[in-house]
Image: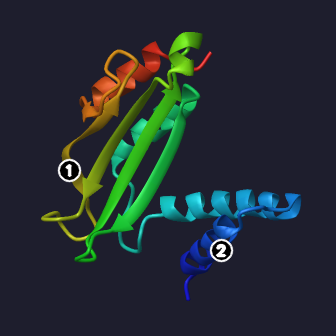
């Protein structure tokens, strides 16, 4: 069993505990953090696409939340998804749960071995348009991030 499979199994087991002790809650956070790290690692023979790496680094530099995940489709073709987001600054908007959140995916279908390419448009939610809609380009997402850093 791979480390990823072991960590996933422990994470699922800890999540099933309805009333966690402080030690179990702390362990859950440690396991969750390790799972996030493992999911961000590309599969053998693949690398993070340059545009994805740029988006992640830019979002982190502006203190946005970032989630990177490599996964496999049913046909075992790997894909890489980046989600970046942050809560709205306005107190009322925060109460309403409004936030900026963008998700873009790169997929290996039809790409050269070890490569991935941008897949469809991705999704977005913004305080101005809270319903899920098509995401703008990676370049435009980076501009929005620069215009709305976490203060």
Q: Separation of disc 1 and disc 2 at Cα?
A: 33 Å
**Residue at x-position 28% and y-position 70%:** 73
Q: Which secondary structure, mark 2? A: helix
Numbered circle sitting on residue 119: 1
Query: Would residue 47 be found to the left or right of residue 6 on screen?
Result: left
User: Looking at the rendered structure, which numbered label has been put on residue 13?
Assistant: 2
Q: Residue at x 36, y 72 (%)?
A: 45
Identify the coloring. Answer: rainbow
Residue 12 location, quadrant: bottom right
Residue 94, picture quadrant: top right
Q: Evaluate whether residue 149 shows in this view.
A: no
Residue 47, given in percent of the width and then of the height, sits at: 38, 61
Q: Residue at x 40, y 18 (%)?
A: 127
Seen from this angle, which residue lies furthest left? 110
Q: What is the quadrant of the N terminus in the image?
A: bottom right
**What residue is at 46 percent from the left and 51 percent from the top?**
68
Count every numbered label the image shows and give the total. 2
């Amino acid at each position: 069993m791979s480390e990823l499979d072991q960590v996933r199994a422990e994470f699922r087991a800890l999540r099933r505990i309805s009333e966690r002790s402080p030690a179990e809650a702390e362990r859950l956070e440690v396991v969750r953090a390790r799972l996030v790290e493992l999911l961000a690692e590309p599969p053998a023979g693949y690398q993070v696409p340059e545009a994805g790496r740029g988006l992640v680094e830019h979002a982190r530099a502006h203190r946005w939340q970032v989630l990177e995940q490599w996964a496999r489709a049913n046909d075992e073709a790997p894909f890489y998804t980046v989600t970046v987001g942050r809560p709205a600054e306005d107190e009322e908007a925060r109460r309403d749960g409004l936030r900026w959140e963008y998700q873009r995916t790169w997929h290996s279908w039809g790409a050269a071995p070890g490569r991935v390419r941008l897949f469809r448009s991705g999704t977005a939610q913004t305080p101005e348009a809270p319903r899920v809609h098509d995401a703008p380009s990676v370049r435009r997402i980076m501009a929005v991030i620069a215009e709305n850093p976490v203060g």
